[in-house]
Amino acid sequence: MGVKLREKKINDGRVSLYLDITHKNLRKYEFLNIYVSNKRTDLKESQIKRKLAESIRSEREYELIIKESGLNDPKRKQSDFIIFLENQINSEGHSSKSWKSLLVHIKDYCNNQRLTFIAITENWIGDFQKYLLTKSLETNTIMTYMSCMNTALSIAVSQKIIHENPFKNMPRHKKLKRKDVERTFLTIEDLNKLANAKTNIHQQVKQAFLFSCFSGLRWSDVTNLKWDDIDNLDEKTKTNCMLRFRQKKTGSFEYLPLSEQAIDIIMNRKDEFIDFEKTENKNYNDRIEQATGKEYIFPFLFVKNKLSSAKTKMANQQLRKWAKDAEIKKDIHFHVGRHTFATLALTYGTDLYTVSKLLGHRNIQTTTIYAKVIDRLKTEAVAKLPLIGK
């Protein structure tokens, strides 16, 4: 391993300075675009340029030593966490609203000044958390932001920017505790009302939502569902029909058995697509849907661009109209389908561990909130029993 400063004469009589870098039996050259003259009149300028080239050589050698030893570079702790976070959002797939909102709040808290990694201590994190509490944000929302920051700092540890994630040093009593949130879900009676309601919302919005209610899939997973993701769809028996997909949120690969109702929805979509293909005189949007429909089960909802908030907003608006037409007084959005699947599965006797696996939860504690919903329903049902002798 070594970095040597070398010279190369060029046609105009000057000398080009470059680095000869050897590392792990590999050799490469880095031309510095620094040129010096051997003329006496340029001697002072040439000395300055050679010192600059030498400092670059020393810096490259230092970087190699750090890389070779597997140590953290102390200088990187002085880099800007805000720029690091922006890069994570732009290039590493952390583009959710939570990451972007975290970035906005950090910039506000720091008055758009630099925030070095070395400045982020457990005390700084605690103060930032207190600042977020003054912004009238929900506790769970703040916890989501802090979770994103924890993830970002863990990435910085893996990239050897910092030695340890300061979140690990925060006392437990200073950490916020997640509050239980009321989960909106639909009963079988509600689903029957939706199925029988007269409404003019898009057919695929209906089908995708009901499919979520009977499969537990999120919006991001349903809208990206492909025909190739389903095994044994054409078999006469429906007991072997399996869904293979990678969860957009967690990135984990899942195998999910489909209920008979979920399979019927998919079969209806298949019949509709076959009929749609036979239709003539299609407009531009119809042709786009026909093309995507050969690959995606719900092509009307599929969005190639990651920024699909407009399509999500449209679908939720239609779902609320559907609920109103069905005379259901609940605030329905697409994620209600996932809540509905969980509560229905538990209501009809599926154990908590199995429901957790069906939902793709990494931690069964995430699923227990649905168990609390079922316990509440049982308590309400018992309270409705009539009194005797009154």
Image (spheres, rainbow, N blue to C red):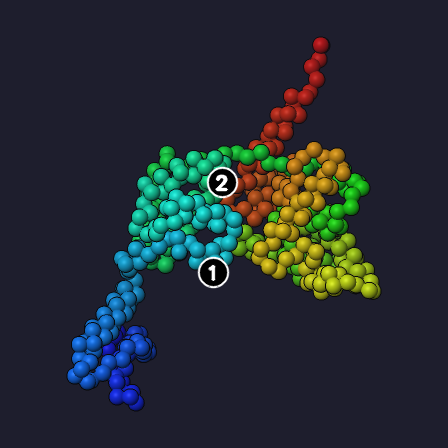
* Depth order, front residue of 192/384: 192
In the image, which disc is placed on residue 91?
A: 1
Give the x, y percent position of residue 65.
Answer: 26, 67
The secondary structure type at the circle numbered 1 is helix
Q: Is residue 257 left or right of residue 236?
A: left
Q: Is residue 372 above or below residue 118?
A: above
Mark 1 nearby-residue class (10 Å; few <14, some 14–19, many ≥20): few
In the image, which disc is placed on residue 195?
A: none
Q: Is residue 285 left or right of residue 5?
A: right
Give the x, y percent position of residue 257.
Answer: 65, 51
The residue positioned farthest toward the bottom in the image shown: 11
Q: In percent of the image, x 45 and y 47: which residue is there? A: 104
The residue positioned farthest toward the front in the image shown: 41
Q: In percent of the image, x 74 and y 63: which residue is there? A: 284
Quickly name the residue at label 2.
141
Quadrant of the image occupied by residue 233:
bottom right
Mark 2 nearby-residue class (10 Å; few <14, some 14–19, many ≥20): few
Q: Amino acid at mark 2?
A: Thr
Q: In percent of the image, x 60 and y 56: which residue is there? A: 245
Measured Cα–Cα span from mark 1 to mark 2: 24 Å
Quarter of the figure with the N terminus: bottom left
Quarter of the figure with the C terminus: top right
Give the x, y percent position of residue 354.
Answer: 59, 44
Q: Amino acid at mark 1?
A: Ser
Tell me how many marks there are: 2
Quadrant of the image occupied by residue 274:
bottom right
Q: In percent of the image, x 37 and y 46: which residue is there? A: 110
Quadrant of the image occupied by residue 71:
bottom left
Q: Is residue 56 left or right of residue 272?
A: left
